[in-house]
Every structure is written in C-alpha cells, then in structure tokens.
Image (cartoon, rainbow, N blue to C red):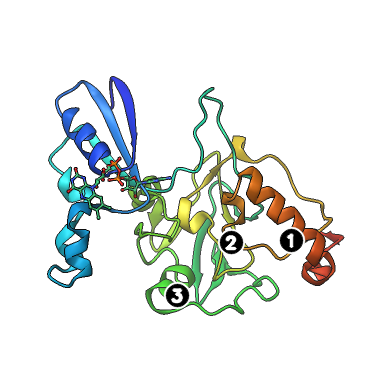
Amino acid sequence: METGHRVVILGGGFGGLYAAKALKKAPVQVTVLDRRNFHLFQPLLYQVATGSLSPGEIASPLRSVLRKQANTRVLLGEAIDLDADGKPQYFFLVKRLVGLPGDHIHLRNGIVILNGVAQNPPKDGLNMPAFGEDQKFLDEFPSVTPDPEPGNFITEAWTVDFASHVKDGDLVVPPGQYFMMGDNRHNSADSRFWGFVPRENIVGRPLLNYWSFKTPDDQEQKTGMGDNLVWMGHVVLHFFSDTRWTRTLHLIR
Ligand SMILES: Cc1cc2nc3c(=O)[nH]c(=O)nc-3n(C[C@H](O)[C@H](O)[C@H](O)COP(=O)(O)OP(=O)(O)OC[C@H]3O[C@@H](n4cnc5c(N)ncnc54)[C@H](O)[C@@H]3O)c2cc1C
C-alpha cells in the first residue's frame, strides 16, 4: 500500500532523473512523468549527428534506469497544464455507452458481442482501416492485453487492472462502471484504451451537435493567446469550407 507524500517529477531529463534518484530512500512515493519513455544523454547528441554513436547508445529507457527504485514509478505522458490551485481539470469526451455493470463484452472482427449477442456496428464505424497488431487489439478485444506505447493512449492503470476483468474471453463490466466506445472504431481512444468509466464521471447525454468543424488532432493542446488568435482567424476564413455540414445541427441518437 502506498504511504507518505507523493512527489510528481515532470520530465526524466537530467534534472528529473537525478531528483528521482535523490529521493530513492525518502519516505515518499515518486512519479516521474515524461512524454518520452527514455532519458536522453544530450551532451553526446553531436556524436550521433556525426555518426560515431547510434541513437540507442545515448537513450536509456527511464523504467530500466529507475527499476530498482521501489518508491518510484515512471509514467509516459505529456503534461499540458499545471493547476497551481489544485482544482481537478476535466477533458470531456463523447462516447457511446456500450456496456453496463455486469455485461460481458468482446469484439470479433470489430463487431461488439454483448452478452453473447452481436450488435449492429455504427454507420461507417469500421470504414477506416486498422493494421497489424493494432487491428487485433481493436477488433478482437480483449484478446490482446493493452500495452502502453508512445502515442497509443493506453493508460498504465488500465494495463494493470485489465486482466482482473477478463473472464472466458469476455471483459466483464464491474459494478458502478461503464464501458464506452467511439463510433469510429478504428480511430477512437475509448474504454479499450483507458478502461471503465465510473458512474460519477458521466455528466450527461448529448442531444444535438450544433456545429462541427474540421480541426487538427493537436489543436486542443494549443492554448496560448497567439494560438487562439490564429485559430480564430482560421475559423473565420474557413467557416464555410471546413464546417462539416452533414454533422452540423445533427440530433444525437
Ligand atoms: C547538444 C547538447 C550538448 C550539451 N552538452 C552539455 C555538456 O557537455 N555539459 C553540460 O553540463 N550540459 C550540456 N548540455 C545541456 C544539458 O543537456 C541540459 O542542461 C540538461 O539536459 C537540462 O536538463 P533538464 O532536466 O532541465 O532538461 P532535459 O534534460 O531537456 O529534460 C527535460 C525532460 O522533460 C521532458 N518533457 C519536457 N516537456 C514535457 C511535458 N510537457 N510533459 C512531459 N515531459 C516533458 C522531456 O521529454 C525531457 O525528457 C547539452 C545540451 C545539448 C542539447
């Protein structure tokens, strides 16, 4: 069981790594968060650039470096904001409710089998292709154990929790929790990636999509004043061409 204060270290560079090492014997729980899964020995970058070292020789996996440190865990992720007041910040997602508490779920060829009954796929739900291992993870869920990799949105907590919810090839939804999926089944970070959603995290049901606009995937991370002004200009200039009219003023079913 975790005890003591928690220390979160942003970045596993020289500063972060040595701070974590210095806390090895301290009575605290340390979390090192980095958007890369490795520590980069920057002073030798030029040797990589000139071809006398390979990139792997100056990059060490953070988990390996800190593996013997019992009070430390390493998480892969990007910090996008710091909330000095300690108020939780939420990111709202719209997903389809697929599994209620007690439901047994698995996917075969991308089709959801709920309590043994195949469900109709959403319209256009499987149009976008998925490849290789990704396809198996997405379409044959939960036959492949989630494995956090850079950029795949799988959370470490889900990786740990996952196996305890799989029974006879089905994922069994626990009490008070819900299984959510996006309709774009091959391009949706959903409960397959981050697990169940507790009831208290569900804020409501969407009724109407009043406006839909083509937006780059990384737009939500651009929060600076300059970025906002650029984006507002873009919206004004491209309002008619980039509005997705088929999805605008669309009732959600
Ligand atoms: C080519 C080169 C040669 C150098 N040579 C020397 C030298 O000979 N001697 C010397 O003393 N210094 C040298 N330096 C400088 C030294 O590398 C830096 O001073 C040192 O790396 C700074 O350490 P840091 O922990 O502050 O940042 P970094 O080592 O840059 O680490 C920052 C870490 O934070 C992570 N991160 C950043 N933003 C986020 C985010 N939003 N969310 C999650 N993770 C994030 C990054 O992925 C990174 O792992 C050199 C630098 C370079 C580039």
Amino acid beneath label 3: Gln
At 62% across and 68% down in the image, what residue appears? 184
Q: Nearer the viewer, mark 1 or mark 3?
A: 1
Whether pointer 2 and pointer 3 mark residues with C-beta atoms closer than 8 Å, the reply is no
Calculate the distance from the C-alpha at mark 2 to the C-alpha at mark 1. Answer: 15 Å
Instruction: Provide residue 114's location: percent of width, then percent of height.
Output: 57, 63
Q: Position of residue 234 (x, y in %)?
A: 74, 61
Look at the picture and state if 26 lies above or below 96. Answer: above
Q: Does residue 48 sit above or below 37 in this rendering?
A: below
Ranked by sequence position, the earlier of labels 1 and 3 is: 3
Looking at numbered disc 1 in the image, what kind of residue is underneath it? His
Closer to us: mark 2 or mark 1?
1
- Element under label 3? helix
> Does the numbered disc 1 mark a residue whose Cβ is under 8 Å from ligand 1?
no
Badge 3: residue crowd in 10 Å (few <14, some 14–19, many ≥20): some
Question: N-terminal of the two: label 2 or label 3?
Answer: 3
Task: Measure how far apart labels 1 and 3 are at the Cα level.
Answer: 35 Å
- Dot 2, crowdedness within 10 Å: few (<14), some or many (≥20)? few
Quarter of the image for residue 118 reads: bottom right
- Counting residues from the start of the chain, the first of labels 2 and 1 encountered is 2
Residue 58 location (% of width, % of height):
17, 58
Observer-nearest residue: 7 or 188? 7
- Count of numbered circles on the image: 3
The x, y position of residue 252, in whole percent, is 79, 58
Q: Who's the residue at 81% across and 59% down the image?
A: 236
Residue assigned mark 1: 234
Residue located beneath label 3 in the image: 135
Q: Would residue 253 be seen by someone viewing this image from the given angle?
A: no
Q: Residues within 10 Å of mark 1 (few under 14, many from 20)?
A: few
Label 1–label 3 contact, CB within 8 A: no
The residue labelled by disc 2 is 217
Q: Is residue 95 left or right of residue 2?
A: right
